[in-house]
Amino acid sequence: MGEGGGEEVAEEKVTDISLKELAKKLEEFAKARDWEKYHSPRNLLLAMVGEVGELSEIFQWKGEVDKGLPNWEESDKEHLGEELSDVLLYLVRLADICGIDLGDVATKKIVKNSIKYPPKIC
């Protein structure tokens, strides 16, 4: 439909997607736009740092906030979700470009941390 035609865009709600699936979608997205030449590790890292800055701005003057953000407006939560997504997507793309299996190394890191920081026994 044309301008203002009331065309509805159906949003697909994805409840469970793997990091590999995200990486594939990001690769296809970049290829379709001929952006691969810009996706060097350095450029992706700098873009991610910029997004972390935008994420930080959301919390900058709020002080401590309660888990679940009960006092936040829905629009603020939506904005937070978008910025978190930007950081995640750049991280996934960076890992993919560097040939790092992010799911695998993250799982190994959790195991390594569990050994380094054992639970306290009361």
Image (spheres, rainbow, N blue to C red):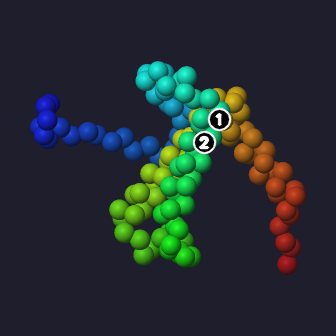
Quarter of the image holding residue 45? top right
Q: Nearer the viewer, residue 102 or 17?
A: 102
Look at mark 2 in the image and give the residue it sits on. Answer: 46
59 in relation to 12, above or below: below
50 in relation to 40, above or below: below
35 in relation to 72, above or below: above
Q: Is residue 9 visible?
A: yes
Quick one: SS at disc 2?
A: helix
Quick one: SS at disc 1?
A: helix
The residue depicted at 46 percent of the width and 58 percent of the height is: 80
Which quadrant does the C terminus fall into?
A: bottom right
Q: Between marks 2 and 1, how big is the CA–CA gap?
A: 6 Å
Rendered image: mark on residue 34: none
The residue depicted at 56 percent of the width and 76 percent of the height is: 64
> How many numbered circles are shown?
2
Residue 49, image x, y percentages: 59, 48
Residue 9, image x, y percentages: 26, 39
Look at mark 1 in the image and give the residue it sits on. Answer: 42
Q: Residue furthest bottom?
A: 122
Kind of residue sitting beneath label 1: Arg
The residue depicted at 65 percent of the width and 35 percent of the height is: 42
Residue 54, image x, y percentages: 50, 55
Q: Residues within 10 Å of mark 2 (few under 14, many from 20)?
A: few
Q: Nearer the viewer, residue 11 or 49?
A: 49
Kind of residue sitting beneath label 2: Leu
Marks 1 and 2: in contact by CB < 8 Å?
A: yes
Q: As drawn, is 27 to the left or to the right of 2?
A: right
